[in-house]
Image (tube, rainbow, N blue to C red):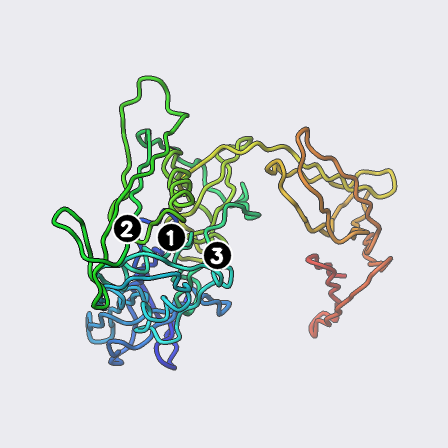
Amino acid sequence: MYVVIGTKRYNRISELRFDPEADVTGNTVPINDLWVSIKTDDSIALSSRIELRDDMDNLWAKYWVTYSEMEDKFTVRVHGESAVSRLDTVTLEPIMYQSEPVGDALSSVLSALGDEYSLDQSFNQKTLSGYCPRQSARIRLQWICLCIGGYVKTAFNDHLEIIPIEDSTNVIIPLDKTYWKPTITYKNYITAVRVAYYSYSAGEPTRTDQYVEADGQTYIEVKQWATLLNNNVPEGANENVVEFDRVTLVNQNNVSEILSFLADRHFNHTEASLSVIDNAEFIPGQRVFFFADENTMGAGYINHCSFRFGLQAKADIDMTPIEGVESDVLVITYKWGTFQVGVRVFRLPIGYDYDIQNPYLDVTFQGHRYIFRPTAASVSGTMVEGGVSVVQQVETALEQYAGHLYVRSVDGVTQEENAVSNQGTIKYGDVVIDG
């Protein structure tokens, strides 16, 4: 890992901390940050931009420097924060939206960011109706995300993104990337969700009316409640109702959708924590499949990743809400004619659309070493109950015996000469043979 500040790259870094999160419950818009110590005597200015990149030059974060102090003569400690922190300092005046396109509303809410944000095009037809009081731009962004079913992503990108919360996924955290064993925990049951929704009409309020003012106009406010009961609570569970009140962008047109969304997030009381090898494949906001044990799979949203860096990045991941997933086994048998040369087994969720690359097989028997190449590049299909078995044919690409290498069937070859031994090296797929 390394950081870039301005146009300068710093490779000598230590004490790197990067723990990004995303909230898909609508409760908040997190401020993501990073801390890093840099071996340099450079003066690093506040409000400069700091980028965190891996050794493949992939961007992990691009934040604003909010702290920069020398720890000693040759080390500076730097703190960077995502653009959300800038929204905390912006106060917005009361406003009444009336079928306001979401994009137009956000251009005002996020004006402090200039053009360093994006709105997913799936929200282009969404509108806002309702009242917003005097509040920070961060809180108003949270309200808008709740009403449109989106969340804010400020990691693994170079700007603030507002993207939809996806209910489906094709991302699996493989068993061989999971440190054993995931921890499953259970919160208290939520017995119901109640959401207040509002309507407004311009006029002169009476003594008993609730009213608000925006843009020099007075509006009479009428508040009502919608409730959704959790029918899966066991008998005898204590009443535990979650209420969402004073989000005055909730109205009769969007309350049902918001209520269902909040119930989905709160009625499932299961959470999971797991440690994985994570080179930015699994990130906050994603809904992923994971292994609870060798034969049991679950699915949930990644809330938080706490990264540790070495030869590969590792992450402690928190996920919620968790649901069990029915799964079965895909068995791929590789045959050379009628002779079996390899088997691969995958456990996949029922209904999962898979597309698995076939490998080149390196097999030795009867004193001969063979490199087999598959006749098809991949195996694809949909996992069904009862499992799937597939036979894939392979053919000989290379054969080595008695000190000789024979090319039988190759669609791409690179040959390198060793200047000392004058031996050739044949590379085929991911397999190297010295001959």
Q: Residues within 10 Å of mark 1 (few under 14, many from 20)?
A: many
Dot 2 or dot 1: first in sequence order is: 1
In the rendered image, the quadrant that contains the N terminus is bottom left
In x, y percent, where is residue 9? 39, 77
Helix, strand or loop status at disc 1 = helix
Q: Nearer the viewer, residue 237 or 366?
A: 237
Task: Give the amino acid at mark 2.
Answer: Val
Q: CA distance from mark 3 to mark 1?
A: 33 Å
Left or right: residue 107 versus residue 368 is left
Q: Nearer the viewer, mark 3 or mark 1?
A: 1
Q: CA distance from mark 2 to mark 1?
A: 9 Å
In the rendered image, the quadrant that contains the C terminus is bottom right
In x, y percent, where is residue 136? 23, 63
Q: CA distance from mark 3 to mark 2?
A: 38 Å
Q: Which residue is mark 2?
A: 247
Name the residue at 48% across, 56% down. 279
Q: Residue furthest left?
A: 207
Left or right: residue 379 versus residue 43 is right
Dot 3 or dot 2: first in sequence order is: 2
Helix, strand or loop status at disc 3 = loop
Q: Residues within 10 Å of mark 2 (few under 14, many from 20)?
A: many
Q: Are marks 2 and 1 in contact (CB under 8 Å)?
A: yes
Q: Is residue 113 above or below residue 193?
A: below
Task: Give the amino acid at mark 3.
Answer: Asn
Q: Is residue 397 above or below residue 40?
A: above
Q: Nearer the viewer, residue 322 or 280?
A: 322
Q: Which residue is mark 3?
A: 279
In x, y percent, where is residue 7? 38, 82
- In the picture, the disc for residue 147 is 1
Q: Residues within 10 Å of mark 3 (few under 14, many from 20)?
A: some
